[in-house]
Amino acid sequence: MATIRLGDTAPDFTADSSVGTLNLYDYLGDGWGILFSHPADFTPVCTTELGTASKFKDEFDKRNVKMLALSVDGASSHNEWIKDINETQDTQVNFPIIADEDRKVSDLYDMIHPKADNTLTVRSVYIIAPDKTIKLIITYPASTGRNFHELLRVIDSLQLTAYNKVATPANWEHGEDVVVIPSISTDEARQIFKKGVTEIKPYLRMTPDPTA
Ligand code: BEZ
């Protein structure tokens, strides 16, 4: 069983999917990626998640994030299930679902947590940066559907902090003030952040979102 941690290189794989054979790295190209697993086809929470994810695709596209789902059933089952998702969630599934019948990808990404369920994947989320490193891992139990607003919010934070010397405070959303990272001095921060820096404490310096 693999253990994947933040900063690791996302394992590449080639697998069958709802749209045919798919190679992860080719699919991602030089953009960002989100890989999220579902316990099984024809299950209620997963049906709502995939419908919601489809409706959020424009938002992921705006952020240059390729979407990729996974479930441990076969491609023909996925395609039957997609018809139900489209019908019941009033959408069109618009990204591939990996068909991981042999659990190859689930094992590679540690998506099966045997004490939760021996055979089905939990709800894992991996966000992969353009350099193919893993930037975020979140694990939800099968009984809790994911919040796709939160996934977009965290992508906004990851993309902002990848290119600017800032971090984002609790509940931050795009456009709100951000935190200056501890490794730069307040004087240095004042040179970098032309919109201004407020020093609340020597270790707590705020500046407006430099990208807003
Ligand atoms: C669901 O997707 O609805 C689900 C799957 C496995 C266990 C519980 C719920």
Image (spheres, grey):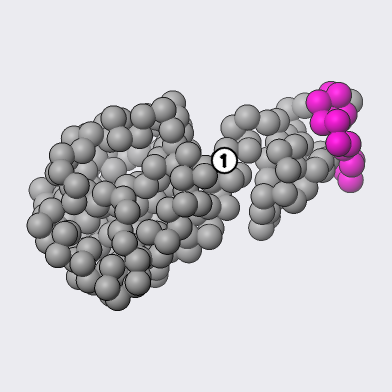
- Image location (x, y in percent) of residue 36: 34, 52
- Image location (x, y in percent) of residue 178: 74, 44
Residue 85 vertical position relative to residue 165 in the rendered view, above or below: below
Given residues 126 and 182, the one toward you in this image is 126
Locate residue 155 relative to residue 201 in the image: left or right.
Answer: left
Which residue is tagged 1? 158
Would residue 96 be visible to someone looking at this image? yes
| Quarter where residue 86 is shown | bottom left
Magenta region, residue range: 188-202
Q: Is residue 45 magenta?
A: no
Label 1 crowd bin: few (<14), some (14–19), many (20+), radius 10 Å: some
The structure residue drawn at horizontal position 63% and vertical position 38%, both measured from the top left corner, is 160
Say which quadrant the C terminus sits in.
Answer: top right
| Quarter where residue 25 is shown | top left
Given residues 113 and 212, the one toward you in this image is 212
Locate residue 31 relative to residue 164 in the image: left or right.
Answer: left
The structure residue drawn at horizontal position 16% and vertical position 59%, both measured from the top left corner, is 79
